[in-house]
Amino acid sequence: MQSANNQVNSTLGLARNIPFDFAGITVYLQCHISDTGAFRVLLGRPFDTLCESVYTNDRDGNQEVTITCPNTGNKVTMHTYARGVIPEHVRAHPGFPDASAN
């Protein structure tokens, strides 16, 4: 896998057709598995292309992303969060790992 700084790292493998639910829009993604990243999930250009992502930034530093379902054309807009900030509604989900698991 090639990172933004052109460094090439090997991955542990590829998980195929993993369903991700984004506020009611389910997208099946091909996920490279890595244990060295400073992230849980890294969505890049393939995701942005598939979902026609549109990012909106405001002067306060807030960001929203609007994605389009590739199958239905439905759109959803979601807030993004700074690295290390886990929203309460996500943290409360029983399947979400504890923040100390990083």
Image (cartoon, rainbow, N blue to C red):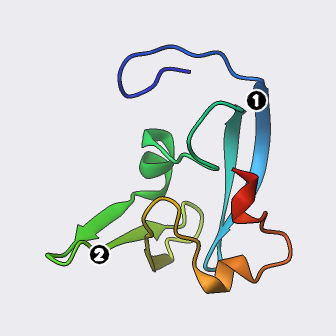
Asked if residue 56 lies left or right of residue 78, the reply is left
Q: Which residue is mark 2?
A: 62
Which amino acid, by three-letter code, is at mark 1? Leu
Q: Position of residue 2 (x, y in %)?
A: 48, 20
Task: Work out whether 66 lies above or below 30.
Answer: below
Quarter holding the N terminus?
top right
Asked if residue 44 lies left or right of residue 12, the reply is left
Q: Position of residue 30 (x, y in %)?
A: 69, 39
- Earlier-in-chain disc, 1 versus 2: 1
The residue tagged with tag 2: helix, strand or loop? loop
Quarter of the view holding residue 88: bottom right
The residue tagged with tag 1: helix, strand or loop? strand
Q: Which of the pair 98/93 is nearer the observer? A: 98
Q: Which residue is mark 1?
A: 14
Looking at the rendered image, the disc whose residue lies closer to the viewer, 1 or 2, is 2
User: Which numbered tag is attached to residue 29?
Assistant: none
Which amino acid, by three-letter code, is at mark 2? Asn
Q: Position of residue 66 (x, y in %)?
A: 39, 71
Mark 1–mark 2 distance (CA, rounded to whole Å)? 32 Å
Residue that extends furthest to the left in the rendered view of this protein: 59
| Residue displayed at 71% across by 32% down | 35
Asked if residue 39 lies left or right of residue 57, the reply is right
